[in-house]
Image (cartoon, rainbow, N blue to C red):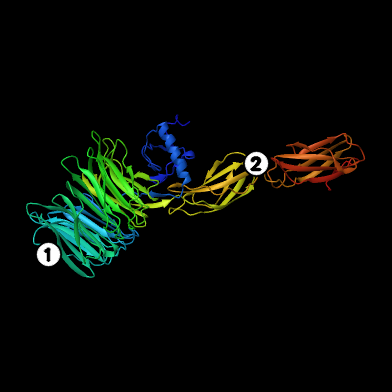
C-alpha cells in the first residue's frame, strides 16, 4: 500500500536539532526532507537535512509511528546547541565529564596545550568555575569524578617536566569551596592516576602506577589518608592500567590492573579493613581494561580486550552479589576484531551495560552493545551504529534504576568528518531515540558521557577540530516525555464556528508549544481543524458547516512531538446567527389597483440574507397563506378583496436560521399606510 512513497516531508520546528514525533507525519507534510535510515523511533530534525526514503523503509517507519502512538509517555531527549568550554585558538584534547545524582553538579576536565583544566558548576550549569589544575611540559590522562550527592569533586592527571612523570590530584569535599591533594609518597616516577568516590563523597580512592612494576593506591576516609602497594612484579615484567571503583558508601572498594598480561583485582567489602586479591582473567594478554561498580556496591564489573595471538576479543566479567559469584561473557568471536570496550553499572546494581567496537573481516568498525536491567537474568544486544557507517570511541552511562541508558560514539558517513552520535532510552531499552549531538561538517572525537542518577540530565563532551585548532565542546540533553492528555474538552457552537476549551494535561517536562484541534461531523472521520499559536486553553474553530453536528478533541505538543488526544467533547451544532426583527415594516393599500405594497428595512442585527413574507386569509388573521421567500425588502399583493381585514408577517433569514416574525394589520378599503400591529 505504501510502496509508492519515496520521500517524507516534515514541518521543521523553530529550534534546530530537536526530535520530531513520527506521530506528526500525517499532518505536518511541509518543510525539509529527511532520511530515517537507522533512525529508530524518533526523527532528528534540522533545517538543512535532505535525503529520500525507500517505500519499504517508509512503511516500517509508519509501523513505528503506530507503536509510538500507543506509548506516548516514553521519554525523549532534547539537545541544545553545543557550547565551547575551552579557549579558542589553542588545541585542547582529552575531555572527561562527571555528574552528580541530581544533575546539579557537573564537572569537566581537559588538556589545553600544556595545561590541565577543571570546569565545574554546582547549580545545574547556571554558573561555572574554571581553574587550572597543573601546567607542565606535557599533560595527559586527565580524570574527574563527582560523588552522587555532589559534595565531593576530584581530579587526577599525569604531568611531565620532560624527564620525570608525576601523578597529580586534587579534590574538594565541599562542592569546590576549598581544595586538597593526596600525597603519593612516591620514590619513583608516578603516572596514570585513576580516581573514584563513594556515593556520599566521604571516601576517595586513588590508584596510580609507580615506575613500571608497581600499582599503588591511596584512600581518604574519615579525614585520614592511607597509602599502600597493591601490586608489585619483577622488574622484568610490568603492570599497567590501574582502575578504581567505590560503592556502598565506601564499604565496597575495588582496585584493578593488568599484571603479567592478566587482569587482577584487589578489593574490600568492609571499607578497607580486609582485602583480597584474585585474578579476573585467566588466559591471554589483556589490554584496555575498564571497571565499574554500583552505588550500592553489590555489582562489580570489568571489561577488557584479550588476545591469544589472534584478533583481540572483547571480554567481560562481573558479579551481582558483592564478589561472591562471577560470570564471564565474551562479546566478540575470534574471527572478529574488537576494540575500545566500555562498561557502566546502574546505581541499584541491577543494570549492566557494555559497548565496544567490532570489525568483521572485510568490513568497517561497528559500535555494538549489550545490556541487562535484571541483574544478568537476560541480556539484550544491539548494533548502535548504522550499517555502512564507520564508528569509533563508544561510551555509555546508566541511571540509578537502569531505565535511562545513554550511548555515544563517533559516527562517520563516507568521507564526512565524524560527528557525535547519541542513542538513549528511558524505559530500560524497550524504545530508543537516536540523533546527532555535535554539528556536522566539523570533525568530532573523544566523546565522554555523564548521566544523573535520576536519568533526567545527559551530559556529553567531546573534542572538535575547527579552524585549524581543536576545541572542547559540551551539551546537556534533557529527558522529557510527550505531553499528557488535555482534559475537560468542551465546545460552544456559533455561526459556522465553535469555541473549543480544555484544561491542559502534564507538559512532560518540556513546555507545551501548541495544541492541535481536531473535529469530526458525526458519522465521519476526524480531521485537523487548527494548530494553535502557543499554549492557549481555548480556540475558536471557524469555517465549519452550519446545521452539522460536530465533536472536537485536543492534543498538546512540546518539542518532542504531540501527545494523545483528549476525550471528545459533547456534540454541538453550529448555526447561523439568528437575525433580529425587520425594521420599519409598513403596508400601503392602493385602492384603484387593488394591491397592497409591503415594505421593510434590514434588521439591526443578524446578517439577514433573505426574507420570508406571508399574508393571512381575509378577515381570518390566524389563517395564513404560505410563506414566500426572496431577497427583496418589498412585496406586492394584488387582487385583494375589498373591505376586508388582512395581516402580513415578515421575518429575516440567515442561512437556515430564521428570525422572529414582525406583523402589521391593514384594511383594503383604505388608501393610506397602516403601521399599527
Residue 671 badge: none
Q: How would you rate the neighbour count of disc 2 (Cα within 10 Å): few for under 14, some for 14-19, many for 20 or more?
A: some
Q: Quadrant of residue 297?
A: bottom left
SS of the residue under disc 1: loop
Q: Position of residue 298 (x, y in %)?
A: 30, 59
Q: Quadrant of residue 124?
A: bottom left
Question: Is any part of residue 203 visible from this angle?
Answer: yes
Question: Is any part of residue 449 visible from this angle?
Answer: no
Q: Is 120 drawn above or below residue 73 in the view shown?
A: below
Whether residue 348 sits left or right of residue 336 in the image: it is right
Q: Position of residue 209 (x, y in %)?
A: 14, 57
Whether residue 544 sits left or right of residue 652 in the image: it is left
Give the Cα distance between marks 1 and 2.
88 Å
Q: How would you rate the neighbour count of disc 1 (Cα within 10 Å): few for under 14, some for 14-19, many for 20 or more?
A: few
Residue sitting at x 55%, y 53%: 487
Q: Residue furthest bottom?
A: 223
SS of the residue under disc 2: loop
Q: Position of residue 153 (x, y in %)?
A: 26, 62
Residue sitting at x 39%, y 37%: 34
Q: Mark 1 or mark 2, which is nearer to you?
A: 1
CB-based contact (under 8 Å), mark 1 and mark 2:
no
Which residue in the protein does label 2 denote? 548
Q: Residue furthest top?
A: 4
Q: How many marks?
A: 2
Seen from the viewer's position, the closer of residues 479 and 318 is 318
Residue sitting at x 37%, y 48%: 429
- Mark 2 or mark 1, which is nearer the start of the sequence? 1
Q: Position of residue 412 (x, y in %)?
A: 27, 39
Q: Is 539 drawn above or below residue 10 in the view shown?
A: below
Which residue in the protein does label 1 denote? 185
Amino acid at each position: 500500500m505504501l510502496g509508492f512513497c519515496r520521500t517524507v516531508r516534515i514541518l521543521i520546528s523553530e529550534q534546530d536539532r530537536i526530535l520530531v514525533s513520527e506521530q506528526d507525519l500525517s499532518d505536518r507534510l511541509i518543510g525539509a526532507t529527511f532520511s530515517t535510515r537507522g533512525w529508530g523511533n524518533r526523527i532528528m530534525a534540522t533545517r538543512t537535512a535532505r535525503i529520500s526514503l525507500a517505500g519499504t523503509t517508509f512503511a516500517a517507519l509508519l509501523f513505528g509511528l503506530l507503536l509510538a502512538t500507543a506509548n506516548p509517555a516514553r521519554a525523549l531527549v532534547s539537545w541544545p546547541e553545543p557550547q565551547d568550554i575551552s579557549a579558542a585558538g589553542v588545541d585542547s584534547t582529552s575531555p572527561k565529564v562527571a555528574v552528580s545524582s541530581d544533575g546539579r553538579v557537573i564537572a569537566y576536565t581537559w588538556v589545553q596545550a600544556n595545561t590541565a583544566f577543571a570546569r565545574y558548576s554546582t547549580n545545574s550549569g547556571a554558573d561555572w568555575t574554571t581553574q587550572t589544575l597543573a601546567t607542565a611540559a606535557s599533560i595527559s590522562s586527565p580524570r574527574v569524578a563527582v560523588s552522587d550527592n555532589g559534595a565531593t569533586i576530584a581530579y587526577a592527571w599525569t604531568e611531565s617536566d620532560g624527564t620525570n612523570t608525576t601523578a597529580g590530584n586534587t579534590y574538594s569535599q565541599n562542592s569546590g569551596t576549598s581544595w586538597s591533594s593526596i600525597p603519593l609518597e612516591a620514590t619513583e616516577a608516578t603516572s596514570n592516576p585513576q580516581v573514584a568516590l563513594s556515593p556520599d563523597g566521604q571516601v576517595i580512592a586513588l590508584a596510580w602506577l609507580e615506575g613500571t612494576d608497581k600499582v599503588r593506591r591511596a584512600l581518604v576516609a574519615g579525614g585520614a589518608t592511607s597509602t599502600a602497594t597493591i601490586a608489585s612484579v619483577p622488574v622484568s615484567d610490568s603492570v599497567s592500567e590501574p582502575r578504581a571503583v567505590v560503592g556502598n558508601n565506601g564499604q565496597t572498594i575495588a582496585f584493578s590492573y593488568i599484571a603479567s598480561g592478566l587482569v587482577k583485582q584487589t578489593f574490600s567489602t568492609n571499607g578497607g579493613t580486609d582485602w583480597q586479591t584474585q585474578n579476573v582473567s585467566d588466559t591471554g594478554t589483556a589490554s584496555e581494561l575498564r571497571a565499574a561498580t554500583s552505588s550500592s556496591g553489590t555489582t562489580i564489573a570489568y571489561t577488557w580486550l584479550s588476545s591469544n595471538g589472534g584478533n583481540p576479543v572483547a571480554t567481560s566479567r562481573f558479579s551481582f552479589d558483592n564478589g561472591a559469584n562471577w560470570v564471564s561473557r565474551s562479546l566478540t568471536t575470534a574471527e572478529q576484531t574488537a576494540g575500545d570496550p566500555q562498561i557502566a553499572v546502574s546505581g541499584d546494581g541491577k543494570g549492566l551495560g557494555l559497548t565496544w567496537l567490532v570489525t568483521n573481516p572485510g568490513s568497517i568498525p561497528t559500535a555494538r552493545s549489550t545490556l541487562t536491567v535484571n541483574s544478568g537474568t537476560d541480556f539484550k544486544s544491539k548494533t548502535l551504529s548504522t550499517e555502512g557507517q564507520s564508528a569509533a570511541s563508544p561510551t555509555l552511562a546508566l541511571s540509578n534504576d537502569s531505565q535511562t541508558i545513554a550511548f555515544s560514539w563517533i559516527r562517520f558517513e563516507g568521507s564526512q568528518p565524524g560527528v557525535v552520535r547519541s542513542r538513549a532510552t528511558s524505559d530500560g531499552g524497550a524504545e530508543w531515540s537516536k540523533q546527532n549531538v555535535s554539528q556536522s561538517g566539523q570533525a568530532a572525537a573523544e566523546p565522554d558521557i555523564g548521566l544523573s542518577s535520576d536519568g533526567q540530565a545527559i551530559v556529553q563532551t567531546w573534542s572538535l577540530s575547527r579552524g585549524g585548532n581543536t576545541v572542547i565542546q559540551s551539551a546537556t540533553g534533557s529527558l522529557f516525555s510527550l505531553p499528557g492528555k488535555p482534559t475537560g474538552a468542551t465546545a460552544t457552537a456559533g455561526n459556522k464556528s465553535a469555541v473549543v476549551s480544555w484544561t491542559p494535561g502534564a507538559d512532560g517536562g518540556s513546555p507545551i508549544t501548541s495544541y492541535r484541534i481536531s473535529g469530526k461531523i458525526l458519522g465521519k472521520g476526524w480531521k485537523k481543524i487548527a494548530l494553535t499559536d502557543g499554549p492557549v486553553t481555548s480556540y475558536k474553530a471557524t469555517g465549519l458547516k452550519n446545521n452539522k453536528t460536530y465533536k472536537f478533541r485536543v492534543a498538546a505538543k512540546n518539542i518532542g512531538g504531540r501527545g494523545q488526544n483528549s476525550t471528545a467533547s459533547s456534540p454541538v451544532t453550529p448555526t447561523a446567527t439568528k437575525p433580529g426583527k425587520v425594521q420599519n415594516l409598513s403596508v400601503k393599500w392602493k385602492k384603484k389597483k387593488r394591491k397592497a405594497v409591503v415594505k421593510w428595512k434590514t434588521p439591526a442585527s443578524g446578517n439577514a440574507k433573505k426574507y420570508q413574507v406571508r399574508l393571512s386569509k381575509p378577515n381570518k388573521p390566524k389563517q395564513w397563506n404560505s410563506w414566500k421567500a426572496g431577497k427583496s425588502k418589498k412585496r406586492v399583493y394584488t387582487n385583494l378583496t375589498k373591505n376586508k381585514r388582512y395581516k402580513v408577517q415578515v421575518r429575516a433569514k440567515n442561512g437556515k436560521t430564521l428570525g422572529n416574525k414582525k406583523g402589521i394589520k391593514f384594511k383594503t378599503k383604505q388608501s393610506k399606510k397602516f403601521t399599527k400591529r
